Image (tube, coloured by chain):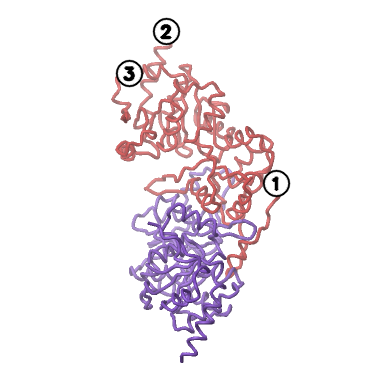
Chain colours: A purple, B red
Amino acid sequence: MTTSPIPWLSLSKEEKKKFISSLDSVVSDCDGVLWLGSKVIPGATEVMNGFKTLGKSIFLLTNNSTKSNEELSRKSAGLGFNTTEDESIGTARLTALYLKSIDFKKKAYVIAGVAVENELKSVGIECIGVGPDVFQVRQHCEAIELMSQQNGIEEGVGAVVVGYDLHFSYPKLQKACTYLADPECILIATNTDERFPLPGRVFAPGCGAFVAAVAVATGRKPLVMGKPSPFAIDLVLRAKGLNPEKSMMIGDRCDTDIAFGNSANMKTLLVLTGVTDLELLKRFENENKTDLLPTYYVPSIADLVDDMNELIAESQQNQ
Amino acid sequence: MTTSPIPWLSLSKEEKKKFISSLDSVVSDCDGVLWLGSKVIPGATEVMNGFKTLGKSIFLLTNNSTKSNEELSRKSAGLGFNTTEDESIGTARLTALYLKSIDFKKKAYVIAGVAVENELKSVGIECIGVGPDVFQVRQHCEAIELMSQQNGIEEGVGAVVVGYDLHFSYPKLQKACTYLADPECILIATNTDERFPLPGRVFAPGCGAFVAAVAVATGRKPLVMGKPSPFAIDLVLRAKGLNPEKSMMIGDRCDTDIAFGNSANMKTLLVLTGVTDLELLKRFENENKTDLLPTYYVPSIADLVDDMNELIAESQQNQ
């Protein structure tokens, strides 16, 4: 039986307040929910800071692998969010925590940016591969002869980590193939977001595009750190005291954020300021994709500002 | 009902000769069947030239997009095959023939090598994109700001062509996303071979890895030129007088060569000198993947040399 997502704005004032009051913790995605690039989404700081004023734990949880938790925290603070590094979780850090959890002692070949390298280094893992890597080739070289070249292959690599990499290139793919030919070498993807919408119905490649190339080239399935996989719950959120049943996940993507929240047994709120629009939500509903359907949906996080302000005023009156 | 592949070596001498005599044409894959890189597979020239001596049409049909038909022909002649350019078919030429067949008049953005560019140019199509293309980025740049950059985007691009590209890179993927945001722009893959085996159970990326990245990043399904798609039959082989029912496809990959031959209603012969080994063949059989099962299989094309020589001797005696 499908439970249809409820429009947040169809709830009565009392229903909204009752629901918010029932929560212990709020986990929010970042891009598309709280900010777009370097611009905060109006109302986002009031709402998130409001949750904190009401005594709830708040966490920022992003699939973005291009920022360390420290950078993520600095960005959110700079945009006006009352959050600490302890409340900021990105997939660069998640990857480091996962490798630490399995007591990983080898080197990691990293197809990703410096944030992944820095987070891995911070848990003592040696990284290679970050930065530009371009094959110098003769134009008419036999492809198979080139493929047989294994320049720059190091000993002792036990993991290939694929994140968002602006330097993604053929030689990186070739090296991933070579390392992953060893069945003991594991393949980790920070996340598999397929693409990013840009203004004007233009799309940009997401990390999932790089991951797909590596997976197809190697015939290996990656272990995915980011939403919707449960690693953030397993490695971080429960450890920080999160009780999923009394928590809400706010996101802009049904296939990552909402799927993650649902699988973790959290309440979920979809905002329509990012990837998933109303049309796509209705399609998921018609296709009975219950794992992708949020508890509530709302045009923007800004639509919670009034409820939040009233709840804060009430809680201050009661003190 | 599955018809099990028949071991060629289990046939009687008479059965083998009768089968070969029944053929009008023989189509052979190249890498893994006739040669490995720049080394001819022993017996391959005797067998293929033998078919020709017996009066059969022969064609070389490769998914490789890194050679024009002229280069392919030059390579095969250099290795001792008695073949002309007219008998050599690669996916670079197939792509050009397809675009010509739909009267394509716009520019093509080419993620592939010079062979694709040269073949497209030869049918009057303007190409952009071939060669190195590396994003110059600041390390700590906001990803979304980078993604919004659309440097070097040209007007009038109506197709993105993805082939084997040793310069595959992030900016190419980004440009493919931008061009393919236009629903009128078509996406063509020369082929989708996933990976290439190298000695020592090492694999190298195949064109399918680049295609997967573009497909995931754009949410588009490519039109695939190479085997197992029927474009070679539709655009070339029937035009050259091939009668599939009286033809044999020789290949080393069940999922490309044999699937292609089967779908075209040709007889098929799998050689075990390339990608598909006996274990994988048995797996396809157990999984009842009838479209991937060859009529016959044989350790190597060399195992046909004796039959060929006897047939040639007999045909010369009869003259």
B38 or A194: nearer the viewer = A194
Residue A109 visible in the picture: no
Residue type of the residue flagged with mark 2: Asn
Question: Would you name the residue on which mark 2 appears?
Answer: B318
Within-10-Å neighbours for mark 1: few <14, some 14–19, many 20+: few
Estimate the x, y position of residue A171 in percent, counting from the top left.
51, 54
Relative side of B264 to A305, left or right: left
Q: Between marks 2 and 1, how big is the CA–CA gap?
A: 61 Å
Give the letter of the chain under mark 2. B
Q: Between marks 3 and 2, how big is the CA–CA gap?
A: 20 Å
Estimate the x, y position of residue A226 in percent, counting from the top left.
44, 64
Q: Which mark is residue B15?
A: 3
A14 or A188: nearer the viewer = A14
Question: Would you name the residue on which mark 1 appears?
Answer: B156
Residue B72 visible in the picture: yes
- Vertical side of B55 occupied by A149: above or below: below
Give the letter of the chain under mark 1. B
Tell me which residue sits at (46%, 92%) in the image: A319
| Secondary structure at numbered mark 3 | helix
Tell me which residue sits at (49%, 43%) in the image: B192
Tell me which residue sits at (32%, 31%) in the image: B2
Residue type of the residue flagged with mark 3: Glu
Estimate the x, y position of residue B280 in percent, counting from the top left.
33, 40
Relative side of B272 to A209, left or right: left
Indicate which disc, 3 or 2, sits on the residue closer to the N terminus: 3
Estimate the x, y position of residue B56 in percent, counting from the top left.
48, 19
Tell me which residue sits at (37%, 67%) in the image: A265
Indicate which disc, 2 or 1, sits on the residue closer to the N terminus: 1
